[in-house]
Structures are given as C-alpha cells and as structure tokens.
Image: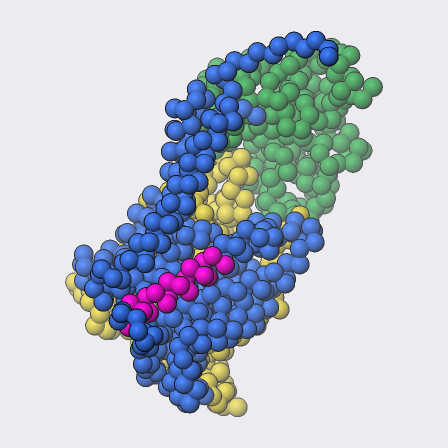
Amino acid sequence: MEQLLQQVVAGLATGAIYATMALAVVMVYQAIDHLNFAQGELATFSTFLAWQMIEWGWSYWAAFALTVAISFVIGVAIDRVLFRPVRNAPILSQLVAFIALFSILNSSDGEIWNFTIKSFPSPFGTKPLFGSGLISTHQAGMVAVTLVMLALLYVFFRGSRLGLAMRAAAANPEAARLVGIRVGWMIALGWGLSTAIGAVAGILIAPVVFLDPNMMLGVLLYGFAGAVLGGLSSPGGAVLGGFAVGIIENLAGTFIPFVGQELKLTVALIVIVAVLMVRPAGIFGRVGVSRV
Amino acid sequence: MMLEVRGLCAFYGQSQALHGLGFGLAEGGIVTLLGANGAGKTTTLRALCGMVRMTGEIHFDGKPITGRATEDIVRLGIAHVPEARGTFVRMTVEENLRLGAMTRRDHSAIAADIDEVYSIFPRLRERRKQQAGTLSGGEQQMLAVGRGLMLRPRLMLLDEPSFGLAPLIVAELFGILRRLNRERQVAMLIVEQNAALALDLADEAYLLETGRIVMAGPAPEIAKDEAVRRSYLGY
Amino acid sequence: MPEREAITLDAAAVPSEADVARPLSLWLDRRRLLIGAAVIAGLVAPLVVANFTIFQLTMVMIYGLAILGLNLLTGFNGQFSLGHSAFYGIGAYTAAILMSGSADLPYYWTLPCAGAVCFIVGIAIGLPALRLQGLYLALATFALAVALPQLLKSHLLEEMTGGVQGIVIDKPDPPAGLPINADQWLYYFTLAVLLVMFAAAAGLVRSRTGRAIMAIRDHPIAAAAMGINTARYKTLTFGVSALYTGIAGALGAIVVQFVAPDSFNFLLSVNFLVGLIVGGISSIPGSLFGGVFVLFVPNIAEKVSTGLSGAVYGVILLLLIFLMPSGAAGFVRRAAAWLARLRRASNSELPIGRSTR
C-alpha cells in the first residue's frame, strides 16, 4: 500500500511535466483546430534560449520572463509567416509544414548548442518536500505552476473579451468574422500563447530530464496522450489527463511484471486507446453533435 | 441612398454566380431580394460582406467598400445574419450576444443592450446560460437576430430568416423586424424564399433569376404582378 | 418528307468532334507512351549503373510500394495512419524469421506470408479503428508504431526476434543461368512485384469497390445511407493497406539483409506520410515519387550540410509544400491540364476561361 502511494505520487510528479505540455497542446488546438506537432521542439528551443541567457550571467527570473516573451513573439511570427500561407491547403499538407518545422528546429538546436546534455537550474530547489521521500520541492513547484497557469488561462478564456473572441474564432471562423473578429490575428495569438506556455513547460522540465535537443520528444508524446485522454476541448481535462498518464505509466512499470522500462510507454498508450474506444472525445471532452 | 450597388458580379472559382446586379437601399428602408433556390440571393449578401470574389461597385454611405475584409465591413455598422444562422453552438446564449458587440468600445452600454435584446426576445432570457446549440431553430434564429442587433447596426442583412421555422414563429419574428425598423431606423436587406412574408414587410423588392435582376419595384406592386403571383406566391 | 429549314451554325464557335477528340486522344497516348518509356528505363537501368545505385533504386521501389499501402488507407479511404512503420516492420520480421532459423523458407515465399500476416494484423487494427476518427485514430496508430520496436526488443519475444541485435539474412542468389548479379536480380524481382501490385491497386481503385472506398472517404454518412457497408470496407482497406506495406517490408528485409527493432520506429511512419503527401495523396504513381523523395532527399540534405541536415530537409519540405500543395501528382495534373487547354485553344477558336453556368 505504501508502495502504491509512493508510485502514485511519483507518477503525479512526472505527470506534472506531461500536464504542462498537454496544456500547451490544447491551447493551440483550441486556436487552430489541430495539433501542433512542433510544439516540443519550440519548447526545447525556448529552453535553450533561457539556458543561454543564464550562461551569460542573467538572473533566473529575468531569463524566464524574457524567454517567455520572446517565445510568444516567435509563435506569432511562425503562424503569420509559415502557416498562414498554407491554411487553405489540404490538412495533410499542413501536417508536412509541422514536420518541416520540427526538423528545422531540432537540427538547429543541435547545431547551435550541440548535443551534450546540460543541466538547468531550478528556482524551487531540489530538496525533498517537507522532508518526505515522496516528492521533491521542484516537482511540487512544477505542479503548482501548472495549476496556476491553468487558472490564469481559465480566467482569460472565460472572463475576458479577447478570450471570448479567440474561442469564437476557433469555433466558427466565418461567423466570427461576421461579428468583426479578426480571425487571422486570433489564430496568431493562440500560437503565441501556446509557444509561451511551451517555454514555461520546457524551463520547468529541463531540471528534471536535463537539457538536450531531444529533450522533448518523449514528453511531447505523453503530452499529446494526456491531452487526448482528457479531451482536446478541455484545458482542465488535458491537465488531468497529463497527470493520469504519469500515474498510469508509473504504476504499469512497477506493478505489471512483464512491462518494465521498455514497454511503459506502450502500456500508457494502450490504456489511452482503450479509453478512446469507450469515450472517443476523451474523458472530459465535449462530444460534438454533428447534424447531418 | 445608404447602400448603392452597381454592376455587381460574383464568382465561385471559375463560374460566375452574379451578372451585373444593381440596386439601392435608402436610409431606414427595407428591401427584399426574392427568387428561387440558386438564384444568387445568398451570394449577393455574401458579396456585400466581402465573402466571395466579386467585381463591381458597392457604396455604403457614399464610400466604396469593395475589396475590404469582412471584419472591416462589419465595423461600418453592417450586421449579417447568415443562412444557417452562424450560431456559436458551444457557447452560451449570453456569450453569443456578447460576441455580437465585439467591435464596440462602450462597455457600459453593452450590458444594457443585452437586456434590451432579452426584452425583445423573452425566450432568450430564459435560456441565457444554456449552450446555444441546444436551442430550437426558432430560438436560434432569434438569437442570430439578437446578436446582429448587439452591433447597433445601421443595416441588417438577413438571409432567409424564415427558413425551417414554424409559421407562428415566423410571424412573430417578422413582426419584431418591422418594429425594429420603425423604432430604430435599422435598414434591412432581406433575402427570402417566402415571398408573401417578405413583400408584406418590405418597401421595395427585387426579383433574381440565375444571377440577374429580372424585376424591380415597390413591394406592393410586385406583389400584385401576375407572373410573380403565379410563380412565387402560388395563386 | 416535311420541309426542313436549314440550320446554319457558326462553324468557328462550335468545336467539331474531331477538334475535341484529337488533342484528347493525343494526350492519352502520350500518357501510355510515358508509362511505357518509364518501364523500359526501369528495365534497362540496373544494367548500366553501379551496384550501390541499383540498391538505391530497389529501395525506392520498396518505399514506393510501402507508401502505396499507406495511400490506399489514407489517400483513398481517408483513414489517417501513423502506424505503417509497424506493418513494414512486421512484414520485414516475418520474412527474416521465415528465412533464417528452422523454417528456412525460400525468399519468394516470404512475400505472400508477410502479406497474409500483415493483412490479418491490419484487420485486427482496423476493427477497433472504426470507432476512432482523425486525430484519435492518428494517436492510436501512433501507439502501434511506438509499440512495435519495444515489443520486438522485449524479453517476451526475444527468442524469435533476436532482441536488440536483430536478425541477419543471406542475400538470395539469382536463378541459375541468368547473366546478372544478385543485386540486379533483386532489382528485377522487386520491379516485377511492384508492377503487379501497382496494377492491382489501379484496378482496385477503378472498380466498384474502389469507388465505394473513396465514397466513404468523401461522404461517410451519405455512403452509408446508400447502402455501402462502411465498416466492412474500412476494415478490409486497413487489411489490404497493411498487406501492401508488409510485402514492402519483406522485400526491404531481403534487400537490406538485416532487420533490427529500431529501424522500424515511428520516424519511419512519418517518412512514409511525408512521402505520401509529397507524392500526391490518392495518386498511385505519386506513391513512387514519394519513394524517390524518402530515399534521396535526406541524402541530399546531408550533403548540403552535415550538421544542419535536418534543417535543410525541413526547408526542402517547406518549399515543396508551398510550390506543390497537392503534391507532385497534383502539380503534374495541373500542368497537364493547363497544357491541354492551351493546345485546345490554339486548335479551335474556343476561348479559355470560365465556364458559364
């Protein structure tokens, strides 16, 4: 029983990483109505920027703030320059644009900063939380920051005019234009927000998994899985999904004998697929009724 | 003349849907565009809002608006209530109305306007927190008109407002439209297949056939015309 | 006989049968000529190039076949798959296991076996896939792609699969008496398989079944309303698609002479998808162009800059997508249509331009 609790909490800790990523994934999904496959690479790039600033001697929080701001701008720019021209192309062609972006970023990261693993500082310290062995202060900090971001986003989207406009632009672009919303800019804004959140995710994750160009590959996967599990239309669901994936992965690895390290990811994905069979829109996703 | 259209041609890809339309709408007036399916009525409204490729001249308040983006045309005070209503189905009724006021800066007045829309359409007040997609067809139409009103428009473009609605609801809706026109001087350009209703409400009527205006004149005269009565009014 | 008024037509305004038929038939013949020329070039190529190039050309055909498999499912039936690396891998391992070890099957028998195994696996995946759409299907197939290398490496199957080290296969000899080397023989063998399977796919697409499959892609609800058993067709398409890619995998194993778990990861799936899109979705010849792309472009990128090869690859991809949003096949189609219109306009006095409705 004690071991179960231990593993659940450990799963929560890793789940915090996935949850943050899942949140970023859902953010851009709400804005552009499909997944941003280059999200992880963008986050890695942002984390490298922050690392570089810290190397140059800047304070952690200054680097953090500036990186988040720059990431926002980069996200907007990528949308306007790269994705706006292909917005009317078939969806699979847009997918190729994502793949291209992924490839460019991954390769550039490696070239600029090389592939040696780097350590990244944590603002929360790495001592065990309250002296117990369950969770470290940094991991608790991650969970806290994720929840705070979620709360801020909730307030933004439900309570502010701009948030309402963004939701409308994603839900029904043509109708949104008819009420005067500049849909193109709303999409760009969604990209910017998503890249900024991804930057926060990367900066928080790096102390745990260490920084290298391929840092986000696995994490993004788990992030997608968590987002889909929770429901792509629900930011809260995505966060919960991310936590759930962390727990499932950990429990499967520990308690199911033949799984071990190799098949952990497979099991997590199988669980998700199984859930989707039962609830195709994710646990908290709202099922869209399509009228024929 | 609030709205003047001359030589309007519209294209979907390679095919031409409108061939040189011309008509006008006076300040506070109601004009109706009649015609069968495929005549080009919806296309006309979409062309006015910059939603289809077009050539020709459109002047609103004496200024040309051709080539401008839909979002900018809306900001001039033109509210378009589209076919299929354009409801934001996952958002609440109240959020839909707030969206109608998206371009306005006078925040304090918006709340008061929402209240007014509720007084015009009491059924919407009952359902203000409900998801708009769960409303009936008639209620969604009212919501669409209400959302259009939130713009405080000078001109409303209505695309088949009677479509799919029960006769009683339609009568109610058209009564409301008449009131809005008289009390607030909202000009209206109404596209309708239900000719009788539209001719009863409008001042002027234009008859479209395959992208061309084949008849034009004051609504009462068009209503009395033999050919129109046979083809469109059924008697 | 009643009197009939002579009807005079403005001869220049109405194209005669001959005018319309002539450029059309010319174009059709041109297409057959092109295909014929390509086949002849394909037959001659291995006799005039170096062994390594023969190997590359063989791999192009194999990738083209694998992409055609994906095309049948995603391009023609609209079911999104990120898991075709798994079918390729299963086909490859089936061939490797049957050729090494106790079974010691001749290489040509491994192809139908790989096809059959993958067909069954495809159906097994296709059945639950009926419940999933779009993104969710992508995720599920992605799970499949991720799972396979891990399964292949795991202790459960290590005995059969050789674990992380994989399996080595002997290169098959050309049949006795033919004056060609092993590489050339494998090339011709692959070419034969390719031609048969491409022709079969073309036949399938043109048949009633093919139309049903495409109808399901375009309007699934309408298709069902017309009495098409969408579940059956979608599942069968999954199976056939897996079969194609599985046979390609088996060929790949034979030609490369080696299978290892990590060569069949999801990056391969992504490669297939990119090849499909660049070649042109729902274009059968486009799949072959996709194979060319998948094999050669990463190499080119590497040559341009070793450190930034990924970035160069990405830039090339972007250029292709901007210039040819519908893939190579779409580009060729549009160019051909434009040329045909020009020719028709110069033959008769017909103006090019909008049709009047």
Chain colored green: B
Principal SS element in the magenta part? helix
Q: Is residue A101 above or below residue A228?
A: above
Residue C127 location (% of width, % of height): 60, 68
Q: Is residue B81 left or right of residue C174?
A: right
- Name the spot of residue A157 as percent of width and height, x first: 50, 52
Tell me which residue sits at (52%, 73%) in the image: C116
Camera-side residue: B50 or A143?
Answer: B50
Q: Which chain is blue?
A: C
Residue B43 can be seen, yes or no = yes
Q: Colour of chain A?
A: yellow
Q: Residue at x 24, y 55 (%)?
A: C312
B67 versus C251 height, above or below: above
The image quarter containing residue B208 is: top right
Instruction: Give the quadrant of residue C344.
Output: top left
Asked where in the image residue A98 lies, by quadrant, the reply is bottom left
